[in-house]
Amino acid sequence: MRYLLLLPLFALVHFLGAQGAVNEREVGLEGRFIEAMQEALLGKTDEAITKFRALLEDDSRNDPALFELGRLEYAAGNTPAAIEALRSAYGLRPNEVYAAFLAELYQSAGRYREGADLYAERIKVNPAETGNYLERAAFQVRDQDIKGAVKTYEDLEGRIGINPEVTRLKHALYLGTGDLKRAERELTRLVEAFPDHVGFRHLLAGYYSSQNDDKNAREVYRAILQLEPDDVRAQLALQDAAPRAGAGTGDSELMALLGRADVDLDLKVGKLLPLVQQVATTGDRDLADRLLVLTGELRRVHPDAAKASAIEGDLYFHSGRPAEAADAYRATLKLDDTVYPVWEQLMASLYLSNQMADLRKYGEEALDIFPNRPSIYVHYALGEAFRGDFAAANSLLQQAQFMVSASPESAAALEELTTAVALLKKPVAKMEVDTDRLPGGNNGPLALYLRQVNEPDSAILSAADNPLNTNALLLELMGDARQRAGDRDAAADFYTRARAAGSKSPTLSEKISRLKS
């Protein structure tokens, strides 16, 4: 379709330029051509087709009119008719524009043999044009004529010599047919033809690696290092630079790699990710701490790279430090706020560390960017619920429920959560909710609150407190526990913090007033 916008102008100019000394008949034909073009430009395809067909009845050798008729038939979905019109136009005036559009029509109709034949003719007309060979071979491949395609590529190489693009195409054909020896030979010929080109050697080494031929792959990588001693990809291929859990012998090597500004960031990240995954699976805090030293170096060298701070956040999160994880994810979003998993991890971290004011703030921001993600509604709802705004929380949960209605498992989990949020508003003596299925599981803020709400324990609640805690309901419950223990000053402090956290609890003001009286 890349030619369609050019065709009307091309055809009109071509038609007018071909007139020379015009007579009355030719003037009439010219006028009819322009009228048909006007219908086409106005989007009146059927009317334009009718006018061009009538014009061609009187002037069957009018190749611009045939060209335009073919374009319109194609636009109307009549590909066979379009092909016939273009074949006639090309037969009258075999130029590149007609040929290119006719080839596009052949491809659209699946008439690959005819496309290959068209470019075979173009090669005879212009044997020096590389594109004709490539187009012919492409049609032959679509027609499953692999031998013919290889022969076309070889004919091209006979004219231009070994060419990287042609070599890769032949390599792919041999690989697809299972002829591994010829596939390998194509790449070795390329390396022999361009011995100083490191990139071609990487292609060969990558091929050997894909075939599990480690011996030949290593030989190629060694040859690359002889040419380019600082080639990082070859260095990494010849040594396992990543440290392993329980043995820190590789840390210094990896630290040196991470500290090199000339090494691609993705290569470094690729070395760290298996270890980050190990922390995510095991929760190994010692390994996380070792890796945090390395990610610190990564952030130093790449201060503007969101990936570096995101990895740091993942290490903190999966080793049980949600507050620190939240700081790292905030830093990530400042660098790049378009990656949804970072938002989800941030909100989970804020929830687990009881930073409910920030949870509401980032939940609102996240909805502006990702309005169709149920997890955002859930976390935002938790932020609202833990300041006592149950109407807002339930509205958000209903939105999430609507989004996951097609998934029975997700819908059931949300029902459990909705029940738990209702218990925040009206606690009952016997809590009938599976806390393991709530966000954060049995140790999350919601499960903790529901266990403690009827008989709060100061020691257990204090362990969940931190300077960043803006969980208004939990702070109020902590105040209740201190008041029961007779510590009025501590209770007043918790109540004040709850109010500062945006509490909408109907009982908080009364409790503060009683303490002051």
Image (spheres, helix red, strand yellow):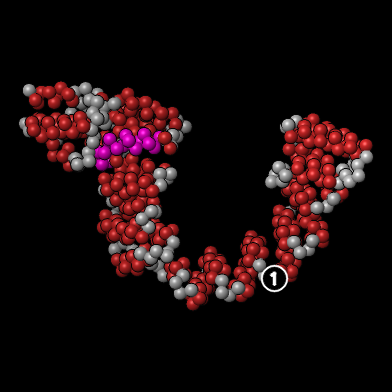
Q: Position of residue 345 (x, y in %)?
A: 35, 44
Whether residue 85 is visible, yes or no, is no
SS of the residue at dot 1?
Answer: loop
Q: Is residue 97 above or below residue 402?
A: below
* Relative depth, front residue between 9 and 4: 9
Location of the C terminus (image quadrant): top left
Q: Is residue 362 above or below residue 331?
A: above
Relative placement, left or right, of 394 versus 59 is left
Q: Is residue 265 above or below residue 213?
A: above
Work out which residue is located at the far front of the displayed protein and give it.
21
* Secondary structure, magenta segment, majority class: helix
256 inside magenta stretch:
no
Q: Position of residue 41 (x, y in %)?
A: 74, 34
* Relative depth, front residue between 118 and 40: 40
Q: Residue at x 60, y 73 (%)?
A: 194
The residue wearing badge 1 is 161
Q: Residue at x 72, y 56 (%)?
A: 135
Work out which residue is located at the far bottom of the displayed protein and give it.
226
What amino acid does circle 1 point to?
Gly
Relative placement, left or right, of 67 versus 281 is right
Q: Position of residue 247 (x, y in %)?
A: 30, 66
Q: Position of residue 330 (x, y in %)?
A: 33, 45
* Relative depth, front residue between 278 and 378: 378
- Range covered by the magenta-colored residues: 351-367
- In the picture, residue 408 is in which quadrant? top left
Q: Residue at x 67, y 64 (%)?
A: 166
Location of the N terminus (image quadrant): top right
Whether residue 429 is visible, yes or no, is yes
353 inside magenta stretch:
yes
Q: Is residue 140 above or below residue 216?
A: above
* Relative depth, front residue between 215 and 470: 470
Relative placement, left or right, of 218 versus 471 is right
